C-alpha cells in the first residue's frame, strides 16, 4: 500500500518512491504540522498533530540530535524538539472488520529554532533535513538511513 500525502499545493507525493527531497520534506511538513495552507510548519506554526509523542532521550532523540547539530554546531545550546508518530500493525484495520486501510509507519520530526532553524524528518527508513527551515527548497536526503 502506498502512502500519499497532499500538501497545500495539492500535489500528490508518494513517500515510498519520491526522489525529490524537497517534495518529500514538504509533504511531511504539511502532514505533521497543524495550521492552514498559509502557515509553514517550524516557521509560522510549531503545533504538531495531537498523535505525536515527545521524545526526550534515547536512540531516536540522539539520532535526531546528531543530524541537526552535525549541520550547525552553533545550535547545540538551543533546545531540541523531537517527536514521534507511530502507526502500528494493529491500528491499520477497521475495528471489528478484516479491512486493512493503511500500512504501519513511523515518522520522526525534530527541529531546533532561534529565528533560524533546522528541521528533520524520518519516515520509516527515509530521512531528510532542511538546514534553513524557513525555506521549502533546502531539503537534502540523509544518505546514512
Image (cartoon, rainbow, N blue to C red):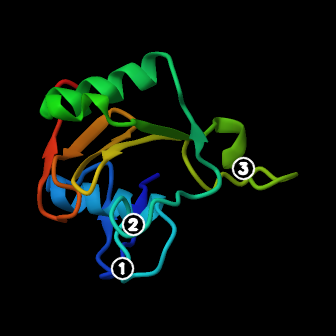
Q: Which numbered disc, 3 or 1, marks the residue that appears first in the sequence?
A: 1
- Give the residue pinned by disc 2: 30
Q: Residue 27 appears at what percent x and percent y?
A: 33, 63
Instruction: Tell me the crowding category of disc 1: few under 14, some 14 to 19, or many 20 or more residues within 10 angstroms, Cα based.
Output: some
Q: Residue 84 appears at what percent x and percent y?
A: 52, 38
Residue 8 is tagged as 1
Q: Which numbered disc, 2 or 1, marks the residue that appears first in the sequence?
A: 1
- Give the residue pinned by disc 3: 93
Instruction: Say which of 29 and 2 sits in front.
Output: 29
Q: Is residue 88 above or below residue 3?
A: above
Instruction: Tell me the crowding category of disc 2: few under 14, some 14 to 19, or many 20 or more residues within 10 angstroms, Cα based.
Output: many
- Gap between marks 2 and 1, in whole Å? 7 Å
Please tell me whether mark 3 or mark 2 is closer to you in this view. 2
Considering the numbered disc 1 on the image, is that residue within a helix, a strand or a loop? loop
Residue 45 is tagged as none
Question: What residue lies at 54% left-to-right and 45% top-to-bottom?
Answer: 103
**Image quadrant occupied by the C terminus:** top left
Look at the image and tell me whether residue 101 can be seen.
yes
Q: Residue 81 appears at what percent x and percent y?
A: 44, 40
- Gap between marks 3 and 1, in whole Å? 27 Å
Q: CB under 8 Å between callouts 2 and 1?
A: yes
Look at the image and tell me whether residue 143 can be seen.
no
- Gap between marks 3 and 2, in whole Å? 25 Å
Instruction: Say which of 118 and 97 sits in front.
Output: 118
Question: What residue lies at 47% left-to-right and 58% top-to-bottom?
Answer: 32
Amino acid at each position: 500500500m502506498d502512502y500519499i500525502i497532499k500538501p497545500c499545493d495539492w500535489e500528490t507525493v508518494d513517500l515510498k518512491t519520491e526522489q525529490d527531497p524537497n517534495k518529500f520534506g514538504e509533504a511531511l511538513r504539511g502532514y505533521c504540522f497543524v495550521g492552514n495552507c498559509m502557515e509553514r510548519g517550524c516557521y509560522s506554526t510549531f503545533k504538531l498533530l495531537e498523535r505525536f509523542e515527545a521524545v526526550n532521550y534515547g536512540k531516536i532523540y540522539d539520532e535526531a540530535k546528531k543530524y541537526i547539530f552535525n549541520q550547525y554546531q552553533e545550535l547545540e545550546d538551543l533546545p531540541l524538539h523531537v517527536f514521534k508518530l507511530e502507526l502500528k500493525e494493529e491500528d491499520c484495520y477497521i475495528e471489528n472488520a478484516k479491512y486493512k486501510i493503511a500500512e504501519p509507519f513511523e515518522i520522526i520530526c525534530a527541529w531546533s529554532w532561534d529565528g533560524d532553524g533546522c528541521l528533520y524528518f524520518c519516515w520509516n527508513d527515509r530521512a531528510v533535513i532542511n538546514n534553513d527551515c524557513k525555506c521549502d527548497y533546502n531539503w537534502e536526503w540523509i544518505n546514512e538511513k
